[in-house]
């Protein structure tokens, strides 16, 4: 090629001095890579993270991906129930008592932003509901959730949480998957990938969606991301059982069994040709689990078998229709925990069309009405669920996590009736296996605006949940696209102060 027809960069490549320099750098890089490979630092089979800890790979049988597995150490919790409230519950109106808000109601102290997520900010606003001391601990909680507040002596509150996003989809992704972007495994997928399940005829991970539908981030909240597909959450609720489990009316039980037996033989021969194919094994395992669920799910969904006292306690026959349906979801959650399902994620709120307090906790206007509506749905059934689990002795091995994606501002929006998103401070709580009772960790500032004492990231939050399940968040990883990926990315510390 005529050098005159080449780009300036191309002509530089033909320069002898540049050629020798680039060759020297390349050879040096190859030599360094060889040295690192010899020390095991560049090998995908045994990569060491920056912490100096090598990943621990769960020993998964591709033919039986749900078999129970040992954790990294003895964990306090064998199961986890996550109660997730999409839309962002206002911490300053529920569990984070701030007397300064009443004292300075209607004022705008210095340091408060003029503009927040949805526009101009207004003045400080006292809680819309009175706070009262609860139980022997004297924990101050609001009258918005009185029945949940009555259980405060069983809870371990974290008041200094903060997150990376003030947008709902990214906020939901972050708390549930550890990343604001989509495509990463959810907490439930990580837990079942590491530990499998103690239950043979039900999914290892169940997501019980709100009666109104999916949350804003949809199935990403309980997806498997780049983990094997076997570990994604199976979503259904008391109103909508898993689809396509029923046998056609003109198809006998004998026909069904013969078909299943034939499929098992064919699948086994197919797997022999492709040993170690995780996607194929996951598909076969899902079909086999579906066959088992044809027997187990109808029994699980039969809430009519519950005594009248349970229905009354949960509130399945009182209040709004949404409350009654959510109450049935709460009974279903308890039954799943009883059966040994590893992770149950119970949603209180959805977001099919933007929410704004109608379908979830996102109260940008009329918070007094919209939060009250959501609380009527959640309070009695959730309190009954926690009390029921405790009464049956299930909290000995079950960790309860009540959470939301971020908080709300201590001041009103410009419209004067709602609170905007607040990623700088919010409250979640734990209960059950491995955590202190009647305890509060961390503090937000005097207004509930920013985390002030022991600021706690969601990386710390998720690291603590994994620790309680016997998993080291720094060593539970999956090699994907050249990186050791984990739920907590490269961050996170266990909140040791809340552990028993």
Image: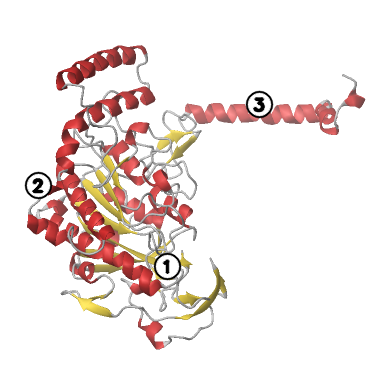
Q: Position of residue 262 (x, y in %)?
A: 24, 14
Tell me if residue 463 comes above or below residue 21 in the rendering.
below
Q: CA distance from mark 3 to mark 1?
A: 60 Å
Residue 178: x and y in percent read 42, 49
- In the figure, is residue 34 to the left or right of 457? right
Q: Count up the numbered dots.
A: 3
Instruction: Please tell me whether mark 2 or mark 1 is closer to you in this view.
Output: 2
Query: What percent of the width, then of the height, locates residue 22?
Result: 73, 30
Q: Earlier in the sequence, mark 2 or mark 3?
A: 3
Q: Secondary structure at mark 1?
A: loop
**Residue for point 37% across, 32% down:** 229
| Disc 2/disc 1 C-alpha distance (Å) | 37 Å
| Residue of label 1 | 363
Kind of element beneath mark 2: helix
Q: How dense is the environment of label 1, judged by Cα within 10 Å: few (below 14), some, or many (20 and up)?
A: many
From the image, tell me which residue sits under label 3.
Answer: 27
Query: Residue sitting at 32 percent across and 49 percent down?
Result: 209
Mark 2 and mark 3: Cα distance apart in space: 73 Å
| Residue 37 in sight from this viewpoint | yes
Which of the two marks, 2 or 3, is nearer to us in this view? 2
Q: Which residue is mark 2?
A: 305
The quarter of the picture where the N terminus appears is top right
| Quadrant assignment, res 78 | top left
- State the residue in front, 396 or 310: 310
Question: 276 or 131, which is in the foreground?
Answer: 131
Residue 473 visible within the image: no
Q: Position of residue 102 (x, y in %)?
A: 38, 85
> Which is more toward the observer, 196 or 497?
196
Q: Say which element carries label 3.
A: helix
């Amino acid at each position: 090629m005529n050098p005159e027809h080449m780009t300036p960069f191309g002509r530089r490549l033909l320069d002898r001095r540049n050629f020798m320099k680039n060759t020297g750098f390349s050879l040096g890089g190859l030599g360094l890579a060889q040295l690192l490979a010899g020390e095991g630092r560049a090998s995908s089979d045994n990569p060491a993270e920056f912490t100096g800890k090598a990943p621990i790979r769960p020993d998964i049988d591709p033919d039986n991906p749900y078999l129970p597995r040992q954790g990294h150490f003895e964990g306090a919790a064998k199961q986890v129930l996550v109660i997730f409230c999409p839309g962002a519950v206002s911490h300053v109106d529920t569990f984070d008592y701030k007397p300064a808000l009443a004292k300075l109601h209607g004022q705008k102290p210095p340091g408060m932003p003029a503009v927040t997520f949805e526009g101009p900010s207004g003045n400080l606003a006292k809680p819309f509901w009175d706070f009262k001391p609860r139980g022997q601990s004297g924990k101050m909680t609001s009258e918005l959730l009185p029945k949940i507040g009555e259980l405060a002596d069983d809870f371990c509150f974290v008041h200094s949480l903060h997150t990376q996003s003030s947008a709902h989809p990214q906020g939901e992704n972050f708390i549930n998957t550890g990343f604001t972007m989509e495509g990463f495994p959810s907490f439930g997928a990580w837990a079942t990938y590491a530990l499998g399940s103690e239950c043979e005829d039900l999914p290892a991970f169940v997501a019980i969606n709100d009666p109104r539908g999916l949350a804003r981030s949809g199935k990403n909240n309980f997806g498997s991301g780049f983990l094997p597909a076997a570990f994604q959450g199976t979503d259904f609720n008391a109103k909508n059982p898993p689809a396509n489990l029923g046998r056609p009316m003109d198809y006998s039980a004998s026909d069904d069994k013969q078909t299943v037996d034939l499929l098992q033989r064919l699948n086994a021969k197919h797997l022999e040709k492709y040993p170690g194919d995780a996607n194929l094994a996951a598909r076969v395992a899902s079909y086999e689990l579906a066959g088992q669920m044809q027997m187990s799910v109808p029994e699980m969904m039969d809430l009519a078998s519950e005594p009248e006292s349970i229905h009354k306690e949960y509130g399945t026959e009182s209040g709004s229709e949404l409350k009654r349906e959510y109450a049935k979801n709460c009974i279903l959650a308890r039954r799943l925990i009883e059966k040994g399902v590893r992770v149950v994620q119970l949603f209180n709120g959805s977001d099919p069309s933007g929410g704004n307090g109608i379908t979830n906790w996102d109260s940008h206007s009329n918070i007094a009405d919209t939060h009250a509506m959501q609380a009527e749905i959640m309070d009695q059934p959730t309190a009954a669920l926690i009390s029921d689990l405790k009464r049956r002795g299930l909290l000995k091995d079950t960790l309860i996590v009540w959470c939301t994606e971020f908080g709300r501002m201590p001041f009103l929006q410009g419209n004067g009736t709602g609170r905007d998103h607040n990623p700088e401070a919010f409250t979640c709580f734990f209960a059950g296996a491995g955590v202190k009772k009647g305890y509060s960790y961390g503090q937000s500032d005097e207004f509930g605006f920013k985390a002030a004492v022991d600021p706690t990231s969601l990386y710390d939050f998720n690291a603590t949940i994994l620790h309680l399940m016997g998993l080291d968040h720094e060593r539970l990883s999956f090699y994907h696209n050249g990186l050791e990926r984990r739920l907590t990315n490269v961050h996170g510390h266990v909140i040791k102060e809340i552990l028993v």
